[in-house]
Amino acid sequence: METYAILRDLAVIVICAKAFGLLARRCKAPMVVGEIIAGLVIGPCLLNIVQPTDFINKMAEIGVVLIMFSAGLETNLQELKKSGFAALIIACVGVFVPLVGGSLLYMGIYGFASFGTDEFFKGVFIGSIMTATSVGITVEVLKEMGYLKSRVGQTILSAAIIDDIIGIIVLTFVLGFKDPDSNALLVSGKIVLFLILSVIVGFIFYKLFKYYDDKHVHTRRIPIIAISLCFAMAYVAERYFGIADITGAYIAGIILCNVRDAEYIDRKVSVNGYMFFAPMFFVGIGLKTDFSNVDTSMILFSVGFVIVALLTKIIGCGLISKCFKYSWADSLKIGIGMMTRGEVALIITNKGLGLGIIDSSYFTAVILLIIISSIVTPLLLKYLFSKYPEKALTENT
Amino acid sequence: METYAILRDLAVIVICAKAFGLLARRCKAPMVVGEIIAGLVIGPCLLNIVQPTDFINKMAEIGVVLIMFSAGLETNLQELKKSGFAALIIACVGVFVPLVGGSLLYMGIYGFASFGTDEFFKGVFIGSIMTATSVGITVEVLKEMGYLKSRVGQTILSAAIIDDIIGIIVLTFVLGFKDPDSNALLVSGKIVLFLILSVIVGFIFYKLFKYYDDKHVHTRRIPIIAISLCFAMAYVAERYFGIADITGAYIAGIILCNVRDAEYIDRKVSVNGYMFFAPMFFVGIGLKTDFSNVDTSMILFSVGFVIVALLTKIIGCGLISKCFKYSWADSLKIGIGMMTRGEVALIITNKGLGLGIIDSSYFTAVILLIIISSIVTPLLLKYLFSKYPEKALTENT
């Protein structure tokens, strides 16, 4: 492909994402839903004007990294401390219930298997695909509605971050049975090491930024250094510690969220995000979807998979939230906010494919889950937040 | 390559571009020189931390498109009209002199050849590599010093744009001898058609934007629609009319330069440019350089090639500028501003390689020309502008 050919894709994606986004907003749906639908419409599913290329995937990766960095920058640390313990427990339950639910679904359809067999293992793997919440879409919706810094918003965000880490630990343990290279203890150690490293790097950079920032306000180099830190943390997390790059980016954001220029950095990052990279991520989900080779049994499994994946998160996260004195409406918001799945589910599926645990037909179910959760979550969240506005919001903004 | 691996390259490029850029500025050199040197240092030439990947090339392409779009947006149409005729003649002479100079250089070294022979043809091709000025670097320097909208700045910019088009016409004629698919008349017709199309599209979009802009000032969709137009024009120019994408982007910028929100669009485009894409372009030039397989005879030819390429532009454009009542200092500025070569020279070389006219060793000379002109031009321009400030500047800013 000639280099200039990407300009065509860019022009089409940028304008269609905006057009469908505005259309979605006019239909009272969040803009990201419009962007995903834009991807379905211009992609191989329908018009086939734009194909998902390697370049678009990479732009999308940058997009989701910037979204998470921006979310980190907007973190209210005070609120996170308040919601921290609740978030931890919500995340744990929100990993455990889908893991069990997914395993039972698989065994319910294909017959129960005793512990240790390949079939048992495959069931547990199906369950582990369901564990990791993809917070990107929820964050966009919460941001759009101004609830990101609210108590519910912060809880969802923290729980989703923690659940990513727990999900990766679970995956590591599950894969430990199969993959000789994957050592559960080693990987757990790596995760602990990464958190320690984050605290050290965080402390140093926070001090450096605070010192530098007080001398040079609003110079161009501040956001550039910040974004390099974000990319570096994201890369190091995934490359050396086996933690999702988006988690690294989020932590980079948290490191800088109390710096005086945090809002200035966020503004510069957001301009890049909304113009190029974020649309690439959301349109990209639609582009990657391909319904052409789906048969009846796969449809049935997929439907079951989606229902179990959504309900286990709502029930798991929702019920446990209620124990933490959230109202029923807020508990439901948390459960629904946690039910989006995204690239982590795809990465896990891909890993299982590479190790020969499952075959490629399972991608259909996962992609269906991503699309449905991406479309349904924003709609439900928007409905719930407008019907039951969060009381704490006025205190926080 | 895993998708997340690009984050490492991005982190390194973004931070090194800024660091070397600031270092260059501290040495009183323009920042772009620092960025090119950053590419040489972190690239295969020296440390080999970052390799020039397809992804970086594509980001660089977007970078140079955005730079040209931004230059178009900042065009002072009044001034362009004033400098238009002069620019046209300067461009013509600035194409003709290097074309002849390059041909003579080749024949001087390898022996004179009579018209129509392969050797004659190869000489003319070497000349045509030298024709197209790459205005990207000059624009960045002029912008940095605040002279982009000055009379000299506008003349250089217009002449470089026109010389791109003339360069492509020349190339088309030269290739017409060899390539059965390339019809000189057809391609000339395409160029004329593109200009007509630009006027029509320009008129429609200008009216639409003016209407829309007066109703919605400063909404996010304005820069997004503008940037889609830029990408679309760039793509259509290269894909359907054989005109460089950067020329299309520049014309898109000119179309919108009189819209009320032009400055707002430019600001949003520039944020994207300076944070990600522009550094990719300048660092990318350094990254692509490889001095490993260069022998003595190639070094001698390359030195001659660079000297002839630089001097023919200075003499050609400089002397003819003097005829248009520019002062000697301003004529020299124009000559030097026109001597940068860039991706167009590479594209032409690549085309000659594909058609079997020249072999790959000629890339060394072209890359050397690009690097030397990229480093020398900003230094000389900066020196000249500070020693002989342009008198017209105060009227225009």
Image: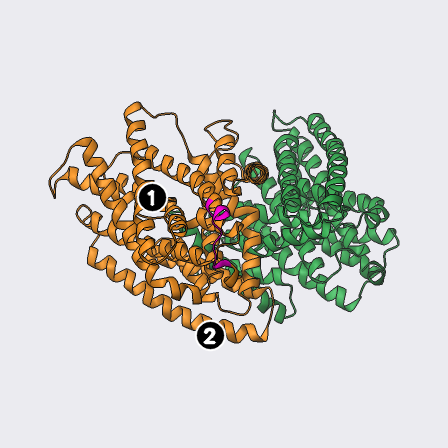
Chain colours: A orange, B green
Sequence order check: which comes first, mark 2 or mark 1?
A: 2
Q: Position of residue A254 (x, y in %)?
A: 44, 63
Q: Position of residue A133 (x, y in %)?
A: 36, 48
For mark 2, name the chain. Answer: A
Q: Residue at x 29, y 38 (%)?
A: A308
- Is B349 left or right of A344, judged from the image as shown? right
SS class, disc 1: helix
- Magenta-drawn stretch contains B324: no
Residue B160: tell me if it is visible. yes
A166 is higher (above) or lower (below) than A380? below
Amino acid of disc 1: Ala
- Is A178 left or right of A19, judged from the image as shown? left
- Which residue is outermost to the right? B325
- Report the magenta residues as a range: A384-393
Residue B101, which numbered label?
Answer: none
Q: Residues within 10 Å of mark 1 (few under 14, many from 20)?
A: many
- Is B163 left or right of A73, judged from the image as shown? right
Q: Residue at x 61, y 52 (%)?
A: B370
For mark 1, name the chain. Answer: A
Q: Position of residue A12 (x, y in %)?
A: 57, 36
Residue A207, which numbered label?
Answer: 2
Residue A125 occupies which quadrant of the picture?
top left
Residue A345, which numbered label?
Answer: 1
Amino acid of disc 2: Lys
A369 is higher (above) or lower (below) than A263? above
Q: Position of residue A1 (x, y in %)?
A: 50, 35
Of the 4 image quadrants, the one containing the C terminus of chain B is bottom right
Q: Residues within 10 Å of mark 2 (few under 14, many from 20)?
A: some
Q: Residue at x 69, y 29 (%)?
A: B187
